[in-house]
Amino acid sequence: MKNKITKVMHGKLPWIAALLLVIISITCYQTYAWFSHQKKIAELQKVKEPNQLFISAAYAEDVIYFTIPKIDVSDTTKPTKEIYPFAVAGEYVNEFTLQLAHTTNVPFTYKIYEANINTSAVQNSVEYKVGEKWTEFATLTFDQRTHPAGTMLYLTRGTEVQGQYLNETSSGSKLASNKYHEETFGEYSKTYVQDNAEPLYWQKSGITSVPDSSSWGAKPFFKTFVLEIDWTGLTEYNNKETDVIYISAYRDN
Amino acid sequence: MRRSDEKKRDLTALRLERKKITFNLVLFLAASFVVLLAVITAAWFANNRTVTAENAPVSVANRGFELASSGSVVRHSTYWPNADANYDNGADGSGQVYGTNETVSYKATGGTVHQVKQWLTSDNPDEAVEPGSWGSMTFYVIPKTDGDLNIRFTLDVRGFYEEDDNSLVDISTISTDSSMDPIQKLNYQDALRYLQGHVFFFETLGAPEAQTDAYYFEDPIQNGTFTYQIQNAEADKLYPVTIYWIWPATIGQLTLKDNTSHLREGIPIVKDITGSETEPTDKSKVIDIVKTNKVDIFKYGSSSADGVNDVIDASDNPTNYSHLDDWYNKADQTIGVYIDYFMVEVNATLEN
């Protein structure tokens, strides 16, 4: 009998038993404490999808290739207007808004037309050499890019995009009013901004992205436009003048 | 002779054994007692009971509380069941708002329900948030017994993406998903980190509509936690708590001390400082939060987070600003692309 007790008291059993008992007690107390005193209240928020539209070159190439070279008004042998192609490209949107903002140092007439893409030379077209797809679009596949890089395309003016200026001083004045001065310049007072540096804003909303949206299947797209700059009737300037233009696009839905 | 020696040896051995046994027994009892004492003490701390005594100058901590909110609608209610099925609508109740004559009906935690949704008086179901969005959560603490009440609030932001069948997947659960493309997994997890880094919490409204010197908030909540104390709380009264959150549109609204550099767009998140104020100011707290969480606020691309604290301190330098702005906006774009819904979770525990 003594031997048995000796064995049990010597063994690991009492230690294990004690340890187990303690662990169980602690767990019970801690769990009980946690349950009885932690409460939560929560709400859900939906995240808006970010704008996935870009301004690119005419065939979804890097926008760096969109250029407006120096315009020489004095050369009367050349036509008095020129068209410059660009595109709105990106993930599919149903409709989008196109905005043109420009300063008014030179009283050019700006118009935007949808571009018609031709594979052979056509009158009044601008030559355009297809470049590599923009790396920004690495994860997008454009079904519309049927011509490989190096193809020569001929772009002409299609339907005019009928937008309107939002802040002209009066219709046709080609001068911006103070209406959007704060949006453009923030706290910077109007007294420091020359009248022609105040940009004119032109917009058109509800532009459909693809001709037939129901069969398009919400795939990435690009829509090619041409910006027409017209200096008909302008006399020669002795001074160089520079204007800044911004083209931007925003999804409507 | 031999027998006596043997007996002596046996006796000594036996005495030694007994000593060992006794020693072991005492040790065992002592150890158990120490552990038991620790357990009881811990339980006592976690489970305070109110003691009422006549003319007692000291009141003992409150026994507990419920959380509640009042309103007729839960935002995005159809998405709740698959966002987190543990959240209950809450049990109906009504009570008086402390310090007023106003009685409100509410939905609250209680019994086995420990997690409830935030109810609102009105909701726009199409509402979606983007950089620049901000909002508030107003709920009630309802003490269960009289006495001082100290609560620790901890705020969490959970992110979800939506599947084709409109179900939501909690991004914190995808690490164990072996079928998901590892790059896609990383995209979601990065987006969640950036979301958690870009949502800032505050205790007090500032002056967002002010004509001059407008700013959004005061009292930044640091490390996602703050304490809330009611002295001599009354049982069953409703004590309102409001927390404010914002997803700032631009980094300048966070890190610029003022707008002398003219780099900032929009109003600052907290009051501008001149540098002569006593520290810490709200602005210095916000800048500290940005520095602490810089890995989760900026998408660096090939740059690293090293040395970025100095860049943040000198964010009024145009070159520095353009880097921070670019990194912040890239993180915003990632959030927008990968996160479809997020949850603001308010945890409340008794604090002593």
Image: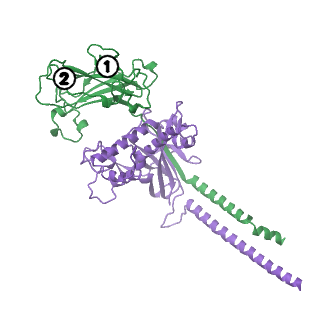
Chain colours: A green, B purple
Q: Look at 31% across and 31% down and name the residue there.
A: A64
Residue B342 spot, x, y in % from top left: 47, 40
Q: Look at 29% across and 20% down and name the residue there.
A: A127
Residue A128 spot, x, y in % from top left: 31, 22
Q: Earlier in the sequence, mark 1 or mark 2?
A: 1
Q: Look at 63% across and 66% down and name the residue there.
A: B35
Q: Which quadrant: the N terminus of chain B? A: bottom right
Residue A52 spot, x, y in % from top left: 39, 31
Q: Chain of mark 1?
A: A
Check disc 1 and give the amino acid type.
Glu
Question: Which residue lies under the disc numbered 1?
Answer: A114
Foreground: B245 or B27?
B27
Q: Look at 23% across and 27% down and name the residue there.
A: A69
Q: How many marks?
A: 2
Give the left or right position of residue B234, taking residue B302 as reference. right
Give the left or right position of residue B316, taking residue A94 as reference. left
Foreground: A170 or A38?
A170
Residue A217 spot, x, y in % from top left: 46, 22
SS at badge 1: strand
Give the left or right position of residue A146, taking residue B50 as reference. left
Residue B340, labelled with which disc? none
Q: Are marks 1 and 2 in contact (CB under 8 Å)?
A: no
Question: Which residue lies under the disc numbered 2?
Answer: A171
Give the left or right position of residue B290, taking residue B28 as reference. left
Task: In the displayed orientation, state which residue is furthest to the top.
Answer: A123
